[in-house]
Amino acid sequence: MVQGKISSKISQLSYSIYGRKTRSFSERLYVYISLIKNLKTGLFRVVNGKIRLRNCASTGKLITVRGPLRVEGSGKITVGDHCKIWSHMGVTQLFADRGAELIIGEGTFINTACIVSASNRIVIGKNCQIANQVIIMDGDFHGVDDRDAPGKSDAIIIGDNAWLATRSMILKGVEIGEGATVAAGSVVTKNVAPYTLVGGVPAKLIRNLEVPNQNQDKPA
């Protein structure tokens, strides 16, 4: 099993570097050296993840963190298996306030300079793609008329396989359906149906997306 995975990785690297299988000893040697470098980088990111996420309530297996991820708050943060969180070109921030909960599902990727701030509850599903500089914030922190008064908050739920494009913003009380896509720069203030593309300020339906075959028989 392990040997098969290594062979597959070598083949992928060969096509990535040369666009074909290797043809000489020097090409194979270069691919092996590249593989070792990749493994060392991956190991460093796993260790970095262990350090950066050490105060979380629960963390899964093989979480990779690139750069100085910032994790704050006295709430409960849970990160699932095989998540990738990048924080090298801009600091990504995860925050859960006292009594709040932030859950990130397995296989989800969060890119650089994102802010995920839970005052109530934020649930991000499995295998989601969250692009650079996305903001997910379920609370107002303070009132609008009386800025010394506490702000309103309401849970955010993001379904599996959702894609939040660059600089989109998800505000309190929103539920984003499975497989939905939020266009770059959008501000989402209302629920988004599964397998739809929304965009704009505030975000509105642009079109329906193709539903993968395995999900077509699921009840609405």
Image: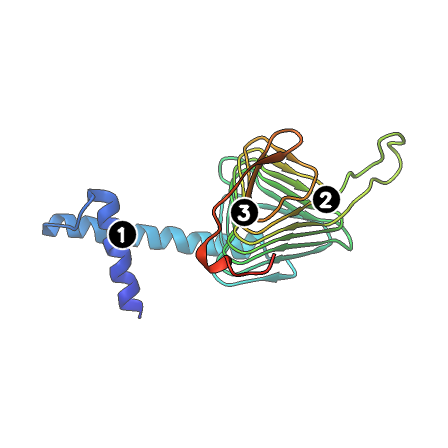
Of 139 and 70, nearer the camera is: 139
Distance Cα–Cα, label 2 vs label 1:
40 Å
Q: Which mark is residue 138?
A: 2
Q: Which residue is mark 1?
A: 12
Give me the residue at 46% from left, 56% from top: 46
- In the rendered image, residue 72, in percent from the top left (x then y), is placed at 67, 48
In the rendered view, tell whether residue 41 sits above or below residue 61: above
Confirm or deny contact between disc 3 and disc 1 (CB under 8 A).
no
Please name which of the two marks, 3 or 1, marks the residue nearer to the observer: 3
As shown in the figure, which amino acid type bears the numbered disc 1?
Answer: Gln
Q: Is residue 210 above or below residue 1?
A: above
The disc labelled 3 sits on which kind of residue?
Answer: Tyr
Q: Quadrant of the C terminus?
A: bottom right
Q: Quadrant of the N terminus?
A: bottom left
Q: Secondary structure at mark 2?
A: loop
The residue drawn where x is 89% and y is 37% is: 149
Question: Which of marks 1 and 2 precedes in the sequence?
Answer: 1
Q: Earlier in the sequence, mark 3 or mark 1?
A: 1
